[in-house]
Structures are given as structure tokens and as C-alpha cells.
Amino acid sequence: MDRQTKIVEIVKRVAGKPIDPAPEESLFESGALDSFTLADLVTALEKEFSVRVPDSDLTPRKFDSVARIEAYLQSRS
Amino acid sequence: MAWLRALGSYVPARVVDNAELAPLVGADPAWLLRATGIGERRFAAADETVASLGAAAAADCLASAGMAAADVGMLIVSSGSAERRFPGPAATIARECGMAGKPAIDLPMASAGGLFGIALAAELTRVSGNVLVVASEIMSRVVRLNPAGRDTAILFGDGAGACLVSREGGFAEIADAELATDGEFADALRLEFDAPLQMDGRAIILQASRKLPRAIGALLERNGVLPTQVGTYLMHQANLNLMVRVAQAVGAPEERFFHNIARYGNTSSASLLIAATEWWRGGDGTLREPLVLAAFGAGLNWGAVLARP
């Protein structure tokens, strides 16, 4: 499973509802994520990809779409 | 050694329920309750000030302690919504309460101000004896009560709380404190001069969801206390969902997190002490298990205080 597919799976799991987000689609504007599920998403990403997201990187903008999440993870690897 | 001796509070008489607020901000009352967990809040009357609310809470606290103003060695007042740059409300509250001549210090810190005040007071009791901590806020005047201000207007309310910290005993000994500040996100929650409150709710929740459990965990671990051994968690009443998240992250039962946000909304720095007062008055005055107070807010400032029977 490639990284983007993994991210989509995690987003779906955290959102807890049937969604199929396009890579550039805003996860907030689409209603897939809210303030609280965003925190869960970051925790899940840390676990799945074995990265630690420092507090300074904890901005909603970095996790607003599958593409942005992928770019962030790429920058951390 | 410092103790939590007594608590007190004051909330304005005017109750603003969701049916009254919702049309002002272009929202549905049922949605408002569902989204925030807040059913009503208090709004200060036109002739009330941050200082007058704080003085009423201070008087209530002193009455509960069975003490007079003359018994207090220092006053600390937190507020993020004071009406002017200076002097802050501390001097006025000291005058109103009859504490003339005693040092009265302003802590211009929203949200976490009550908690920081208690932690500071615990240290200052060594030189000042009884230290009275007051947190007072009139948030209804710093939000926009119209559709443009909906996201913040629905959250906040007005009120004041007070806590007497003493070196002469009390219902709980203040054992330790974990305080922290991160200016990286200072713009995420701010109140500029002559402008309404600005809040990036997502960023604040995200930061709080991570920082607060970490602070509570570090405090408990340092003191050899398991999260499940804490009898009560008293938190800044910012958001019910946040309290549930913090409980889960810390590993403590949700029901040990006292909350009254449904009746008062988020009263910023006052909320912790208003909640603490209600919790304290609902008991028999005897603490049997460790107590944790915790808060998070603008700054960002956050932390936790551990108190023991």
C-alpha cells in the first residue's frame, strides 16, 4: 500500500464516516475532520508512519488535505 | 507549604440562554447546544466591571474562609478582558475589598490566569501569608454578538472566581505545579486593543489536546500519582469535548472531570475557579483523594497543579 493510500485509510478511520477525499480536497471544508478528529488524525499518523510531529508543526493547515499530509510526511522522512 | 483554603465565585444575574443568543449570531439554538455543550451563559450588566465582578467573588471567598480582608497579605488578579491598559483591576478590587496597603498584582492572562495565579500564590505565601487569587472576565464585551462573530460569541460568558491560598492550612495542600508557555501560537488566540477577540479554534484545540495531557501526565508522574488515583480533575471550562479528550489521553475516567460549562460557557480565566467553587461547595469540605487543577489558553499558556488531602 503506497503512502497516499495509507493516509486516506487513516483519514477514513479517524473521520468515522464513509468518505472518499480527493488529494487536494480540504478535509475540514468537506466535513471529514473537525478540531477534535484532527488531533486523533495526527496521533494516528505518528503511529502509522513512525514520526513525531513537534508542537511547532501542529497547525491545521499542514493536515488540511491528503496531499498536504503526504507532503508533510515526506518532509519528515 | 501552601494550602487551598477556600473558594468563592460571582456570576452576573442575567442569564442568556441559547434561544436568546442564537438569533443574534444567526444560529439554531439546538445546533448551538449540540456544537458547544453550552445551554446558557451569564452576561454582565452595563454597570458591572471586571473589577466589580472580581470584588464580589473575592468577598464570597473570604466569607467562605471566615476571614476578613485584613487577614490577606497579597492579592493576585487575572483577567484577559480588563477594560483599560492600566491600572488593572487588582487595585480596584483591593480597594473594594478593603485591602488598602497590601500588594495587589495584575496577571493579564486569559484562560490559564486562574491556574497560574494559584501556582504563584503557593510560592508567595512564604512572604505574604494568605494570598487571595481572583480571576474575573467580561467576555461578552470582547466578542461580536452578530453572525460575523458567531464562532466565538457562542462560547463565552462572564463571571469571576476566587481562591484563598494560605500557609495556615486548608482543605488541600498544594503539592506541585507544572506550568508552561509557548509563544509560537500567540496569534492563534488574541485580543488586540479596540478589536474583537480572534481565535483559530482548530489550532487551539489541536495544541490543547496535546499539551494539556502532557503537562498533567508529567506532573502526576513526578509526584508518583497514577491518573486513576486522582479523585477530581478541575479544568478550565473551555470545551466539554476537550475535557473528554484530555481524560482519555491522560487515562482517567471522564466522570472525574468536573464540569459546569453547560450553565456558564467559557468564562476564560474565571472558569477554573467558578468550577472549583461549585465542586468544593458540593462536597463536605474534606478532600480524600488527590486533586488536579488544569488550564490551557492564550499565550499559549498551560499547566496543572496537584493538591493532596
Image: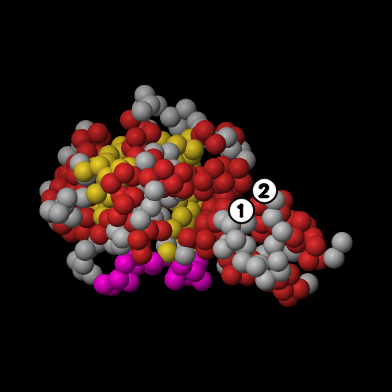
Quadrant housing the N terminus of chain B: top left
Percent x, y of residue B269: 35, 53
Please, what secondary structure does the residue beneath circle 2 have?
loop
Colouring convention used in this rendered image of the protein: secondary structure
The structure residue drawn at horizontal position 42% and vertical position 64%, both measured from the top left corner, is B199
Report whether residue B24 is seen: yes
Percent x, y of residue B291: 47, 37
Give the amino acid at mark 1: Thr
Q: Are marks 1 and 2 in contact (CB under 8 Å)?
A: yes
Which residue range is magenta in the image? B182-198
Q: Residue B265 carries which label?
A: none
The structure residue drawn at horizontal position 44% and vertical position 46%, both measured from the top left corner, is B31
Q: Which of marks 1 and 2 is in front?
A: 2
Whether B185 is among the magenta residues is yes
State which chain disc 2 sits on: A
> Is residue B292 left or right of B49 when viewed as pictured?
right
From the viewer's side, name the closer residue of A50 and B181: A50
Percent x, y of residue B285: 36, 27
Label 1 sits on residue? A37
Q: Quadrant of residue A75?
A: bottom right
Give the amino acid at mark 2: Gly
Label 2 Cα crowd, 10 Å radius (few <14 / some 14-19 / many 20+): few
- Of the residues under marks 1 and 2, which one precedes in the sequence? 2
Q: Residue A16 carries which label?
A: 2
Percent x, y of residue B46: 15, 54
Same subunit, labels 1 and 2: the answer reads yes
From the viewer's side, name the closer residue of A17 and B249: A17
> Is residue B44 left or right of B204 when viewed as pictured?
left
